[in-house]
Amino acid sequence: MALLAALRERNQDVPVIVMTAYATIETAVAAMKLGAIDYIIRPFEMETVEMAVARALAMQAVQRENRFLREEISRGWGEFVGVSPAMQALYDLIRQVAPTRSNVFIVGETGTGKELVARAIHEASGRQGLFVPINCAAIPTELLESELFGHVKGAFTGALRDRVGKCELASGGTIFLDEITEMPTSLQAKLLRVLQEGRIERLGANASIPVDLRVVAATNRDPQEALEAGLLRRDLYFRLNVVRVDVPRLRDRDGDMAILANHFLNKYSLELGRATPRLSPAALERLEAYSWPGNVRELENLMERAAVLCRDGEVDTSHLPAELSREVRAAPQHAAPSLDGPLALKDRVETLERQLIEAALARSDNNKAAAARLLGVSERTLWYKLKTYRM
């Protein structure tokens, strides 16, 4: 027990299995709290030891990956966690775009970490000003213009003093417009003018103020769908979409699940003042089988729950919500169309195209850009086909 305590004080990543012929509940609990991987009571079956060693080696591999991630974080990657090919591609793109003055348009599902990407771009940009985020969906429409551009005293009822807007505050730095498609199109027109002229006017003021802005915008919608629905002005989109960054979904980040889950378990265990529990192979398998509609944010909340509920040093399937066990991910099966019958050749081709498009949309969760990539065509071609077939 003294050795366990000493190892923990030195932050050693050595996995420890305690074996004893003098087992008590108290010593078992104490050993787990001090970081023991397993607790084996003599006499034992060899199979029991083999399973314990296998778990210890798996945990050691995860700890090595965590060390690698800590080193990456120390190089300036903030809160990013992940070593999958999809994340490596994202890191490379951030490195390329950050030092430029180009505006960036980030696209990704809810919970993928779009604001983390925006912050990383700002931090690696070398710009001396502030990073100023604003959630366009969280601020009432009637207040959003004042939040962006500020106002002078008496500009409207309740304007008791001058107020500096977010654009002015972000001058020399970066303004992050999250959920840009939720901004009213009338206000989008004013934002476009600011970007074109490099000047803002506070509400109620006559004089304009020069600003040096770099804009990073984000949305969880498909940009083409937002344009078609009139939620996003084309002229503003073209101004913002100089460089597009697609943030990968959690289910597309092969190999990151164990790293992320253990990262969040460690984070919330430290907050609770407890030893970090290990993640059982069964629990990890359950996590990897889930589709994660809420992405990394959903996983973080789930691991916080597990850290709170876990009392025996191991997160098992009993600590996970029931919906994880109910969902079975399976790729939709789409049978090839039959070419038997009186259909003309043109009709057969159209039938096949329709089924291929439906399959691609289902596989990509209705993401048009991803579906176009699966089909090997441009987004423009896919949109043309969708309109032609009234899909």
Image (cartoon, grey):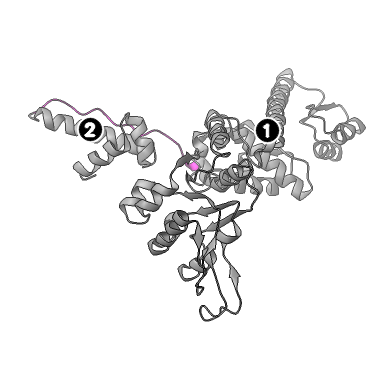
| Quarter of the rendering containing residue 341 | top left
Q: Give the percent coordinates (x, y) of residue 24.
A: 85, 36
Upstream in sequence: badge 1 or badge 2: 1
Q: Nearer the viewer, mark 1 or mark 2?
A: 1
Residues at marks 1 and 2, CA–CA distance in whole angstroms = 45 Å
Per the image, is 156 magenta? Answer: no
Residue that numbered label 1 is attached to:
72
Q: Give the percent coordinates (x, y) of residue 131.
A: 61, 52
Secondary structure type for disc 2 = helix
Specify the farthest residue to the top.
46
Residue that numbered label 2 is attached to:
353
Which segment is the magenta one?
Answer: 326-341
Q: Amino acid at mark 2?
A: Glu
Q: Is residue 221 visible?
A: no
Secondary structure type for disc 1 = helix
Q: Which quadrant of the figure contains the C terminus?
A: top left
- 116 or 367, nearer to the observer: 116
Per the image, is 334 magenta? Answer: yes
